[in-house]
Amino acid sequence: MKKKIIFAALLTAFVALSLSACKSQAKDSITVFNYSMYIDPEILDQFEEESGIHVNYEEAPTPEELYTKYKSGAISYDLLCSSEYMLQRLMSEGELKEVDFSSFENKDNMSSRCMEMCKDIDPEHKYLMPYFWGTVGILYDPDKTNGEITSWDSLFNGEYSGNFIMQDSMRDSFMVALKYLGYSANTTDEAELLEAKELLISQKPQVQAYHVDEVRDEIIGGNAALGVIYSGEGYYAYQENDRLKYCIPKEGSNYWIDCFCMTKDCKNVEGAKKFMDFLCREDIAQKNFDYVCYSSAMNSVVDNYSDAEKNFPAVNPSDEELKRCEMFKQLPKETTEKMGEYWKELKAR
Amino acid sequence: MGNPRKVCAYPYIIWIIGFTVIPLGIIVKYALTDSTGVFSLYNILAIAQPVHLKALIFSTEVAVICTLICILLSYPLVMSLKRLGYMGKRFSIFVLILPMWINFVLRLLAWQMILSNNGLLNALLELLHLPTIAIANTKTAMMIGLVYDYLPYMILPIYNCIDEIDDDLIDAARDLGANGFTVFLKIIFPLTIPGLLSGIVMVFVPSMTSFVTANVLGGGKYQLIGNVIEQEFMTTMDWNLGSGLSLILMIFTLISMVFTSGNEEPGKESAIW
């Protein structure tokens, strides 16, 4: 029996070794970690072709999963793309490396509006390369609503009972309720959270469904009149049906920015910089925007917005609309737990 | 290690150790500790919290209903399969298995399109001048999805059993004056119990935790114990609690398996493969 175990262990070790040997053989390569569906895959091929650097590309669906996978250390990443609150956490843990953005050929293409958004986290612009940004809002079909939608109130006053979709995401749904009540989306106040929970519970019988990716398709398909949605998804829906409208409610909402950054263990600094620089190049940024649909952080793309894009708040919200919005902060563990408990309670109703 | 047959089993053993035993060990470790790594039974006892208990009871309820519907649908189908010729049987089984070649989530999304308010089903009803129905994002839609998904796992083991029943047995019973119902009750049903039991295990256990079905077809409004565990792992990032609840579920599963396999005669076990 012992022999068998040793044999098994040896075989496992052998397989693991040969696998890792395969990886280190690639001559010039970088490992990039990004959200799912968050880059035009053709860009990766084009980069490899032009620079000769092979890109190992990894994906995660949410910031939390990205963080967990990164922290487990199973794969050593050179570059990663995540959202501001997660980047802040990584930075405070000393996980990021400074990048000399002044050496970028396309450095001027990075939008100052987006750099401003990162100011709280990266005041001297040493770590983060803004990539895409967006808001949370309501996508609606004006043919099915009584006029224009301007407020979260439409989701709570019973007017569209059974005809709207909420986000199946704890943080986003609580954000909607908290903002509607006039509180901060980052509140740690138990009474405010409790009030938001009660509001969401009273809303549940009116909710047609809690969805994530399907919100877009349900609105396009006409199965619901309104839905809470991320701006990029909203813009995608608008491209399918240009009658659809997107609104950032007057009570305010959430906005975020996703940035690329270099990890502290980055092995191929030059290659990683080349990749970031490549993403800032005008033609690449345009191609990427056409695929991803979120608001671009590149000047060239913003300048090239069509009139329709300029006037569509999911792509190009006004400063005034943005002022109402708030970025998420990493919540203390107790608050996350409390919110998780409330969310389960809501779902169990 | 002279026996070459045993050597052939090594990849399987490595697979099981690497992807079942070790992960299970990790889950047990997470379940029995708190976030600082100190031994604690909190995560196990958390199942007694009303929210978790409610999810567990609801899951059991859903799983029982799903299993019963599967049984009720399987027997008539399997009985009629038995009457078909060789090619007919092969073809019917092939048709049953065919959807399994397509990804499970894709099939659920297809169901979502069929059942949605402006979906295919309602379009068909309208075409026939019948009143439309609004079952999208309801418990009914979720049950349809679950039954659709797990029905083959009930049909196939029962079919295996029923196919082995000698026609002479049935003819003999008929000769002795048994009517169709008696034949079913006294001959067919008892002889298919091993298949039925493995069918129950294969339908009951996964339908308790099928959180994707609950999310996609139930519109995220129904909470199975699987949804709770998913939330703990993916949203709240409380892996300890998630593991504790998973462990409880595993124990639950084991109990149901002991209960069903205890009735099987040795050597008469049936499986779909």
Image (spheres, coloured by chain):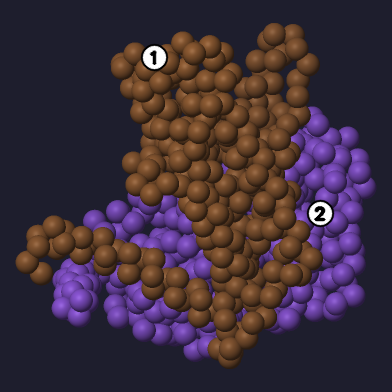
Chain colours: A purple, B brown
Q: Residue at x 70, y 48 (%)?
A: B61
Q: Residue at x 9, y 63 (%)?
A: B3
The percent coordinates of residue A344 (x first, y second) are 74, 62
Q: In this orientation, does residue A296 appear?
A: no
Q: Is residue A115 above or below residue B81?
A: below
C-alpha gap between disc 1 and disc 2: 47 Å
Furthest residue to the front? B176
The percent coordinates of residue B4 (x first, y second) are 9, 60
The percent coordinates of residue A234 (x first, y second) are 65, 46
Q: Both on one chain, marks 1 and 2?
A: no
The percent coordinates of residue A110 (x first, y second) are 51, 67
Taking B9 as reference, is A298 left or right? right
Taking B34 as reference, is A150 left or right? right
Chain letter of disc 1? B
Residue under label 2, please give it: A349
Q: Nearer the viewer, residue A51 or B102?
A: B102
Q: Amino acid at mark 2?
A: Arg
Q: Is residue A189 above or below residue A340?
A: below
Q: Quadrant of the C terminus of chain B?
A: top left
Taking B230 as reference, is A56 left or right? left
Q: Amino acid at mark 1?
A: Leu
What kind of element bears circle 1?
Answer: loop
Taking A304 as reference, is A228 left or right? right
Q: Is residue A231 above or below residue B19?
A: above
Q: Residue at x 85, y 77 (%)?
A: A190
Q: Nearer the viewer, residue A281 or A205?
A: A205
Residue under label 1, please give it: B84
Q: Quadrant of the N terminus of chain B?
A: bottom left
